[in-house]
Amino acid sequence: MKATPGALAAIAALAAYAAGVFLLLLARGYRLRAPRKNAPRPPPEPVAADALGLTLRASHSGHRYYQNELPPKQHGPFVEDALFGQDVAGEFFYQRALEALVGGARDAPVYFRTVAQLWPEPDNPHDANAVAVRIGGVAVGHIKRAECAAFGRLIAERCPDGFAQCRALIAGGGRPGRDGKPTLYSVRLDIALPSDIAGRAEPR
């Protein structure tokens, strides 16, 4: 079946129109590229660290946060694996102190890695086995009650100075949540009890 002269003229007109549009796009600086699926985003621009060594960073998903470099191991009597798996109790009562330790309120969450000291408190009126957690000489919480007796024994047996040091992570802060309440700071320690001490821990 042969195309009619009218059909051929219509096809020629469409081809000429498409060519014109293509040339116009090229003249305006457009580039025709094949779509790229799951293309990785460029890494965030480096930002100078502040006085605490904290820099504003961004994940590939756009999450912004402050973080500093990991301090060296303290080589104390604990197992250190950089997982910060030891919770600290009572941080709720030390929020102002924790905010001051990270340099004040910020516009994004903070992950500040630093060094903490563990001090037994035999004169504590609430628990003679209590072990306080201090950062920069400032109290920020306590070892959990169920574990403080084991930690106290370990410090008494292996720390001639009467206290132990370990790496600590202060996490939290940033802008208030959707409910308008501030995001609280938490403290986690990069320690675990050695197996010979952990086996002697007494639940309370």
Image: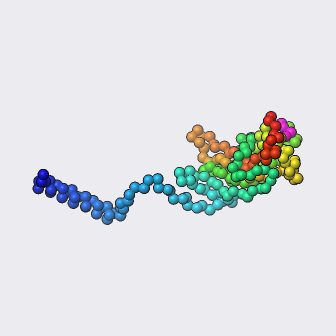
| Residue 58 position within the rendered picture, expressed as x and y whole percent measured from the top left | 57, 54
Q: Position of residue 20 (x, y in %)?
A: 25, 61
Name the image colouring.
rainbow
Position of 41 with respect to 2 (left or right) is right
The residue lying at 64 percent from left, 55 percent from top is 67
Taking the spot 60% from the left edge, 56% from the top edge, the residue there is 56
Of the 4 image quadrants, the one containing the C terminus is: top right
Q: Position of residue 95 (x, y in %)?
A: 71, 44
> Position of 31 compared to 197: left or right?
left
Residue at the top extreme? 204
**Who is closer to the viewer here, 103 or 128?**
128
Quarter holding residue 43: bottom right
Indicate whether 168 appears above or below 51. Answer: above
| Residue 141 can be seen in this image | yes
Residue 97 in view (yes/no): no
133, above or below 204, in the image: below
Q: Nearer the viewer, residue 40 or 24?
A: 40
> Is 129 in the magenta?
yes
State the residue at coordinates (79%, 56%): 75
Vertical order, 31 against 132 (above or below): below
Is 29 positioned to the left or the right of 40 in the image? Answer: left
* Magenta-drawn stretch contains 192: no
- The overriding secondary structure of the stretch rendered in magenta is loop
Q: What is the magenta range?
A: 126-131
Picture mark count? 0
Task: Give the residue drawn at x 32%, y 64%.
Answer: 26
Q: Position of residue 147 (x, y in %)?
A: 79, 40
